[in-house]
């Protein structure tokens, strides 16, 4: 009989560079993928995204303006056990802690009533071609076949002939998708990583970025993003009512990201 054990998860962050998560480990395995990107250390607010891997805090949008949001390109500060970033239209506060074997990150975004935003834990993972992505139930999935706002919707895991649950070898493709579910698992060999997002009265989903050597066109590389989200679109200016998070009359939105890991023994 195969047994499954829970592994302690540990995280390291870099407040000077967007509060980014630079390490996410479980029992000696590093789950975050990285690449050499010289621009990342010197980027300024409003510049194009500098993809160095890790996990970036993307808010108030992923696509659109500013590129990948306004928080990833700013320095954060520490106040007690909280990490804080001040952006022109909002303040984001994050508290990361260990609860048993899990890592739990609690977020609060403060802004004017009615402010619409998308948040993504833009996690790029170090995975083998044999890895697979697990989503429970027949979740609605929005496939973005290009870099625009147009999507094609169907049930997980296959949309428009594209199977999203398997990675496979490089095939010069690059697609994005948003799965309307608050939790996802990634299975690679005997190891699994589990991510979930909880938010009261706000839409939650999981974004996927499956770049198998198809992006960018001038110098493509392989990268796989599995990204818990608030909202159900990449661009906060796209979609319909209910597709973005909205700040209520209290002036604050709160949510929680939980990360756990298991291993088949």
Image (tube, rainbow, N blue to C red):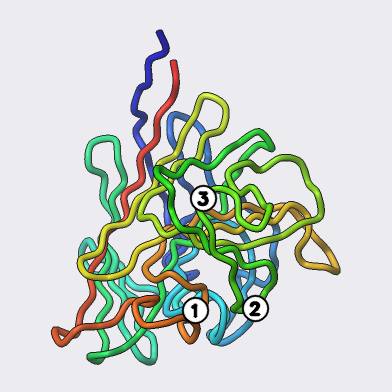
Secondary structure at badge 1 equals: loop
Secondary structure at badge 3 equals loop
The residue singled out by tag 3 in the image is 156
Q: Of the two numbered discs 2 and 3 on the same chain, state the one appearing first in sequence.
A: 2
| Residue 99, x across and y down, in percent | 22, 42
Inter-mark Cα distance, 1 to 3: 27 Å
- Which image quadrant: the C terminus? top left
Neighbor class of circle 3 (other Cα within 10 Å; few <14, some 14-19, many 20+) is many
Q: Is residue 252 visible?
A: yes
Q: Is residue 215 left or right of residue 186?
A: right
In the picture, the disc for residue 148 is: 2
Quadrant location of the N terminus in the rendered image: top left
Q: Nearer the viewer, mark 1 or mark 3?
A: 3
Residue 223 sits above or below residue 77 on the image: above
Lower position in the chain sequence, tag 2 or tag 1: 1
On screen, residue 219 versus residue 235, left or right, reads right
Image point 20% across, 79% down: which residue? Answer: 252
The foreground one among 46 and 149 is 149
Please name whichever residue, 250 or 29, is drawn nearer the observer in this view of the structure.
250
Q: Quadrant of residue 13?
A: bottom left
Nearest-to-viewer mark from 2 and 3: 3
- What residue occupies the far left of the structure in this picture? 250
Left/right placement of residue 250 relative to residue 141 reads left
* In the image, residue 119 above or below residue 240: above
Element marked by disc 2: loop
Distance in Å between CA atoms under marks 2 and 3: 21 Å
Q: Position of residue 254 (x, y in %)?
A: 23, 69
Q: Which residue is at a point 32% across and 68% down the rendered structure image?
A: 203
């Amino acid at each position: 009989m195969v047994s499954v054990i829970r592994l302690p998860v540990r995280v390291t962050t870099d407040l000077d560079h967007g509060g980014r998560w630079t390490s996410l480990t479980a029992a000696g395995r590093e789950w975050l993928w990285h690449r050499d990107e010289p621009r990342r250390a010197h980027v300024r607010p409003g510049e194009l995204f500098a993809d160095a891997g890790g996990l970036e805090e993307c808010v108030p949008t992923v696509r659109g303006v500013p590129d990948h949001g306004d928080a990833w390109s700013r320095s954060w500060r520490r106040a007690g056990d909280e990490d804080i970033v001040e952006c022109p239209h909002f303040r984001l506060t994050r508290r990361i802690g260990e609860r048993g074997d899990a890592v739990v990150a609690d977020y609060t975004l403060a802004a004017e009533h009615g402010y619409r935003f998308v948040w993504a834990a833009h996690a790029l993972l170090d995975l083998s071609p044999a890895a697979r992505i697990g989503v429970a139930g027949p979740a609605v999935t929005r496939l973005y076949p290009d870099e625009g706002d147009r999507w094609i919707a169907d049930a997980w895991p296959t949309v428009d002939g594209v199977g999203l649950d398997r990675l496979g070898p490089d095939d010069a493709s690059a697609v994005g998708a948003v799965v309307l579910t608050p939790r996802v698992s990634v299975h690679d060999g005997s190891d699994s990583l589990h991510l979930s997002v909880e938010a009261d009265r706000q839409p939650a989903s999981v974004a996927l970025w499956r770049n198998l050597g198809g992006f960018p066109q001038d110098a493509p590389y392989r990268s796989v993003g599995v990204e818990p989200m608030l909202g159900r679109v990449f661009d906060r200016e796209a979609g319909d009512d209910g597709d973005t998070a909205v700040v209520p009359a209290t002036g604050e939105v709160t949510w929680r990201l939980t990360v756990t890991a298991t291993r088949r023994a």
